[in-house]
Amino acid sequence: MVQNVIPQQQADEGAAVVIRDVVHTYGSRTALDGVGFTVASGEIFGLLGPNGGGKTTLFRLMATLLPIQSGTVQLLGFDAARDPSTVRSQIGVTFQSPSVDGKLTVQENLRHQAHLYGLWGAAATLRISELLDQLGLAERARQRVDELSGGLKRRVEIAKSLLHAPQLLLLDEPSTGLDPGARHDLWNYLNRLRDERQVTILVTTHLMDEAEHCDRLGILDRGKLVALGTPDSLRCSVGGDCLTVRSAAPEALAARITEKFGLVPRLIAQDLRIEHSAGHELLRDLVAAFPDEISAVSLSKPTLEDVFIAQTGHHFWDVAKEER
Amino acid sequence: MSDQVMGQNRPAMPGLWLPVYTLAHRELTRFFRQRTRIVGALGQPIIFWVLFGAGLQGSFRGPAEMSYQEYFFPGVAAMILMFTAIYSTISIIEDRREGFLQGVLVAPVPRISLVLGKVIGGTILAVLQAMVFLLVGPALSWVGLAPELHTGLTWHNAVATVGFLTLVGFSLTSLGYLIAWPMDSTHGFHAIMSIFLMPMWLLSGSFFPPGESGWLSWVIRLNPLTYGVAGLRRIMSSNPAAVESLPDWWICLTVTILAATCYVSIAVWMTGRRSAHNAR
């Protein structure tokens, strides 16, 4: 696994993706507010965040669909603002909503895509059959895409984005609509691409378990990058264990916990949350101290959601609700 | 950073015509897999022609004593071009909704290729259907659905007719493209069709001859499609008296080419913008 201890300047030089001070607004609404990070070549990088957090806007900026209003977006050394055409020829893009034509067969879809990238004739035929084999689609080549399952459609989508052998693959919510088996296959394939062909992969996701597959993660919330690191290092940053305490009067209980233990619990939704290095001991002491006030308590190792809560002070899902 | 640092070369760009070919080819494939579109685009104008022809036959006084069905014949060809143009450009809205379009927009394809691919695909379909009508129309008189008529179409003017139909078809499909591009739903397109495209066809000299004076004659004179229909009449007519009041052939050709150039230029400009709408 690639570790996150690369100094900034060094990272910029060998980086497949450089995002610097990116600001993007839709009218008066700020979708991205000074976002910056780099993705090293050969890395699987995840942009994790709730819906409405800004990751789709950032994805569209990288895919050259939106104009760069402010800041720098560089992919494989090419500037997305100045040289969008070269960027397009270098990257593969897989969208959340399928860009395959359901009325056409798998093979026809791939043939058209090859033409759009300047591949034709025997070279295109060879490359299409290679990808059909690699993705286990050879037997489906003559089937219309509308007749395929969600998992197979996503495979066609990925085959499309790999036809021109890009060194950087951007995937927007790749697991959406896939059953667990298809998700597993997808991530196996992405890992193989990275290991065997050194393809750099950037995925956006709002799913915690999908984020676990990434070498490194950037967490986006309300247009800002609130955390950056490997899943392990992010979890360690939370510190020790997480205690979640449920009570009928959480605010009063929080005050009493502070008074007795010198800790400041955070009120998240209706629960109190405490991060502590020796959670099991604290749990025992809390229950002994406030047997009547506490209705339930749970102890867990920090998850990526805990990282999100620690950084933002609210639940992952609250943002999505606000955005609606 | 140089290309060598990334260990790769700049890949070949697709050029202008390969994407045009592939996008036009896709339009044709999709069309022939959706049979209902054929019925809609060809069936309705034929029904119009038969019914209006029968209904207005007695009251029509056209140039050079021609029957209404003869007068209406090139007008229906223009109608077929327009309907097919509309149907093929509605697919832009569907492509956007279904996601296909975003896949094309992130490909290194010149934006003019995207426009030309869609428009040429639509034009081929429009001209094919108009030609089917030009051949089938006279045959309807044999089964009694139309009176005997002289369409003026002969082996001598067939190539010029197809050529001019192609130019008018290209112009109408480009117009459809630039109307469809900013739209998010097909409902909006149907509204534009009723209040703009249908009147544009009705006031082009297709349905009735332009009068000598009044506001209507000015509207007809300012309508670019008028020159498309007049050009078609001039090519197909074997009777000079029937077309003597129409605009000169060179004016018809120039206006139609200018209109097409104008529509395509606006379409390319719209497609090339990186905007929130185009990113959807």
Image (cartoon, coloured by chain):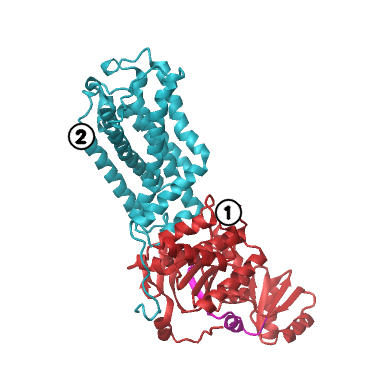
Chain colours: A red, B cyan
How far apart, in angstroms, are the residues tagged by discs 1 and 2?
Answer: 50 Å
Amino acid type indicated by mark 1: Gln
Q: Which residues are magenta?
A: A222-241
Q: A122 or A305, which is in the foreground?
A: A122
Percent of width and height locating residue A179: 66, 63
Quarter of the N terminus of chain A within the rendering: bottom right
Viewer-closest of A58 and A89: A89
Looking at the image, how many numbered discs can be counted on the residues? 2
Label 2: which secondary element: helix
Which residue corresponds to the image point at 27% horizontal and 31% vertical from the top-left?
B156
In this view, B88 is above or below A305: above
Query: Looking at the image, can residue A30 be seen?
Result: no
**Of residues B84 and B234, the one drawn nearer to the viewer in this rendering:** B234
In reply to whether residue A225 is colored magenta, the answer given is yes
The crowd level at tag 1 (other Cα within 10 Å; few <14, some 14-19, many 20+) is: some
Circle 1 sits on which residue?
A143
